[in-house]
Image: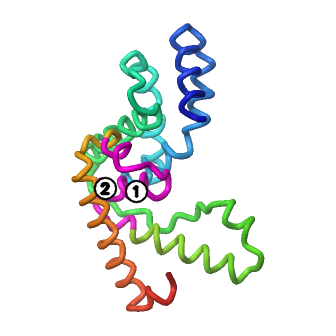
């Protein structure tokens, strides 16, 4: 179980084993980057946020009490760091044509047609997700991609569980509306 592994690594880090932190980074770096990118919507900024979040986590490791999963605590740091980054920068064009794809989806795709359909769906979902408010995109990403439950999302976002449920509902509705706009009514036949 990941939580037990994380707790053991944290004990090693607190005991002076700095190299154990690289293992902790390795196990969480992909999701940290994904969450950051979902909020800041820019590859370079997301990389910077991810780096900053890991540095902050290392410096604040003594504050981690173990009440929740380390990942939940870390995602809270990512969220706060991302919001700080957004406040620092001026409005800019959004990177909506991200060509990063999930290798796993391609491995399971048996033919080119299926691969193209998956790629197009993912591209459309990313475009729609980029249209949401940063906090809504963060919550949807935690719920659907990281598969956190309402309570874990509540801890990571600092929102009440009922507020998380409301934001999930509204986020889903807005995603549906955005996808419907993009597809001009063809949404139900694709999804």
Residue count near mark 2 (Cα–Cα under 10 Å), binned few <14, some 14–19, many ≥20? many
Horizontal arrangement in the rendering, residue 6 relative to residue 136 (left or right):
right
Q: Is residue 118 magenta?
A: no
Give me the C-alpha separation between circle 2 and circle 1: 9 Å
Find residue 90 and name its label: none
Which residue is more in the foreground, 22 or 87?
22
For image coordinates 39% across by 22% down, the residue present is 64
Name the residue beneath numbered marker 2. Answer: 134
Rendering coords of residue 95 (x, y %): 44, 63
Residue count near mark 1 (Cα–Cα under 10 Å), binned few <14, some 14–19, many ≥20? many
Q: Secondary structure at mark 2?
A: helix
Which residue is more in the foreground, 115 or 158?
158
Which residue is more in the foreground, 156 or 131?
156
Rendering coords of residue 80 (x, y %): 31, 39
Rendering coords of residue 101 (x, y %): 61, 62
Q: Is residue 141 magenta?
A: yes
CB contact under 8 Å: marks 2 and 1: yes
Q: Main secondary structure of the magenta part?
A: helix
Q: Nearer the observer, disc 2 or disc 1?
A: 2
Rendering coords of residue 179 (x, y %): 39, 79
For image coordinates 45% across by 33% down, the residue present is 69
- Of callouts 2 and 1, the N-terminal one: 1
For image coordinates 40% across by 15% down, the residue present is 62
Q: Quadrant of the N terminus?
A: top right
Q: Secondary structure at mark 1?
A: loop
- Magenta range is 129-154
Name the residue beneath numbered marker 1. Answer: 41
For image coordinates 38% across by 58% down, the residue present is 140
- Pick out the residue farthest to the right: 110
């Amino acid at each position: 179980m990941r939580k037990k592994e994380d707790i053991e690594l944290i004990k090693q880090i607190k005991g002076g084993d700095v190299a154990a932190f690289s293992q902790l980074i390795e196990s969480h770096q992909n999701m940290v980057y994904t969450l950051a990118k979902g909020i800041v919507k820019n590859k370079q900024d997301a990389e910077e946020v991810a780096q900053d979040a890991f540095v902050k986590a290392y410096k604040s490791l003594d504050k981690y009490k173990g009440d929740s999963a380390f990942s939940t605590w870390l995602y809270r740091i990512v969220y706060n760091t991302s919001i700080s980054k957004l406040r620092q920068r001026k409005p800019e064009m959004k990177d909506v044509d991200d060509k990063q794809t999930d290798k796993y989806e391609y491995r399971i795709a048996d033919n080119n047609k299926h691969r193209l359909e998956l790629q197009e769906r993912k591209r459309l979902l990313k475009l729609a997700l980029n249209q949401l408010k940063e906090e809504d995109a963060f919550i949807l990403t935690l719920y659907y991609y990281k598969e956190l439950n309402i309570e874990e999302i509540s801890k990571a976002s600092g929102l009440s569980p009922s507020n998380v449920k409301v934001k999930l509902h509204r986020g889903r509705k807005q995603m549906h509306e955005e996808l419907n706009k993009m597809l001009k009514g063809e949404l139900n036949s694709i999804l």
